[in-house]
Structure formats: C-alpha cells, structure tokens
Amino acid sequence: QVQLVETGGGLAQAGQSLTLSCAAHGMGFTIHDMGWYRQTPGNERELVASINPYDGPKYADSVKGRFTSTRDYAANTVYLKMNSLKPEDTGVYYCNAKGDTEAGRYESWGQGTQVTVHS
C-alpha cells in the first residue's frame, strides 16, 4: 500500500504564494504519475498539475504560468508552488500517485489539504 502524506496549504491573500508538498511512503513501489487535484463543494476533483518522468509537468489552463509542480524522484515527493493566488484557487487539494507494486497497478490519494484564498 502506498500512502501519501501532504503538507502545506492554509490561508493566503490574493496575490500571495503557498507551497504544497506530498511524500509517498510504502514498500516495493514505483510511481509513474504524481500530481495534484483540486475539489470545491459540489464539484468533482479536477486535475491541477501532474508530472511524470517522460512528459514533464502538465497543468490545468487555469493555473498555467502561476503554479509550478516539481518532483524529487529520489524522495518520492512532489511539490506544488502556487504563485499569484486567486480566490478561485480555493479548494481542497489532493495529492495523487499512480504506479506499480508487486501486486499490480495502484492509484493512491492523499488526505487532502485546504487552501483558502481571500480577496
């Protein structure tokens, strides 16, 4: 089982920055894709950013140019640096990882971290 532990998030004023981090823990696993989804009340989770070793980072149009996702492959950790935050960035951010274990393919989610941006 691959567990994802998120840190970061919290409150910010519009225009400020926040950084999220997510570390994967477990035994005998590899990670292909690792990234972040955002969910707001009444809506489904939407992809914010993802990164894999083949294609590099991908971003939702709404965050391009403002958010940067980086990944420390040795530490199984992914980061999301959020600059120029807007109130519409408010939501619960979930870390996501997809890969393989000895038992087969897996997809894991973090516990979610709240990001609230005030205007």
Image (cartoon, helix red, strand yellow):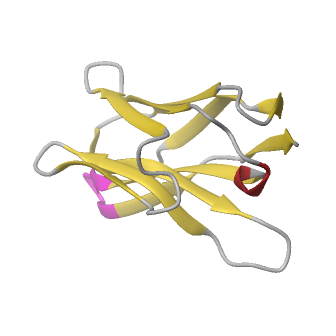
**Can residue 32 be seen at all in this image of the molecule?**
no
Q: Is residue 2 above or below residue 44?
A: above
Given residues 31 and 34, the one toward you in this image is: 34
Query: In the picture provided, is 97 more to the left or to the right than 14?
Result: left
- Which corner quadrant of the image does residue 116 belong to? top right
Residue toward you, 88 or 26: 88
Residue 84 versus residue 86 in the image, above or below: above
Residue 20: image quadrant is top right
Secondary structure character of the magenta stretch overall: strand
**Residue 104 lies in the magenta stretch:** yes
Q: Residue 111 location, x and y as percent?
A: 71, 47
Camera sees residue 26: yes
Would residue 41 be counted in the magenta stretch? no
Q: Position of residue 70 (x, y in %)?
A: 35, 30
Q: Which residue is at 57% across, 69% downward?
A: 46
Q: Which residues are magenta?
A: 99-105
Locate residue 56, reporting x and y percent.
19, 45
Which is nearer the eye, 9 or 15?
15
Image height of 45 relative to 8, above or below: below
Image position of 94 with respect to 60: above or below: above
Quarter occupied by the C terminus: top right
At x 15%, y 42%, the residue is 53
Horizontal side of residue 68 vs 83, given as left or right: left
